[in-house]
Amino acid sequence: MRLVIQRVSRADVRIGDRLVGAIDRGLAILAGVHEDDTDADADALADKAFKLRIFADEAGKMNLAASDVGGRFLVVSQFTLYADTSRGRRPSFIHAAPAELGESLYRRFVDQLQRLGGEVETGEFGAEMVVRIENDGPVTIILESRAD
């Protein structure tokens, strides 16, 4: 599983004219699922993302997690995080999880964030979405469950 996590002052996701999910301060997480990922990968990355200390403390150091600052999570499924561009100019997505597995592990990741106490908004799995992210810092962190 691969996550692109951005600390945001606000973020939202729309499908057409419909607002699907929105947060103010918190983490926008783009989540890609690999064909070999398991429940354990989703659980471990949810735990790591929930506890990721990338918000400033009173001394200005990145020492606080989203939950410490009242931050929320916006999680959007993004299979293109497993694009393979090593050959040619057109990306291949052969290592992205098939839709059924991808959706299952995406939902498990979201559910685990909620079980940990996170307030979570989401996109819609498999939909064409417009995601607006106002990156704060900017701070962007990539987490992976495996070394590719």
Image: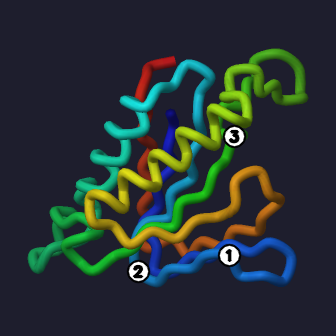
Residue 117: image x %, image y %? 27, 66
From the viewer's perspective, is the residue at label 1 or at label 2 nearer?
1
Above or below: residue 3 compared with residue 53:
above
Q: Secondary structure at mark 3?
A: helix
Residue type at the position of mark 1: Val
Q: Is residue 138 visible?
A: no
Coloration mode: rainbow
Residue 24 in percent (x, y) is at 46, 83
Look at mark 3 in the image and give the residue it sits on.
79
Q: CA distance from mark 3 to mark 1?
A: 19 Å
At mark 1, the secondary structure is strand
Q: Residues within 10 Å of mark 2 (few under 14, many from 20)?
A: some
For marks 3 and 2, the one nearer the N-term is: 2
Q: Residue furthest left?
A: 59
For disc 1, the marked residue is 20
User: What residue is drawn where x is 77% and y is 27%?
Assistant: 93
Q: Which mark is residue 25?
A: 2
- The three-letter amino acid code for the residue at tag 3 is Phe
The Cα atoms of the two marked residues, 3 and 2, are separated by 25 Å
Kind of residue indicated by mark 2: Arg
Left or right of 131, for residue 33: left
Question: Alpha-carbon neighbours of circle 1 within 10 Å: few (<14), some, or many (≥20)?
Answer: some
Q: Upstream in the sequence, badge 1 or badge 2?
A: 1
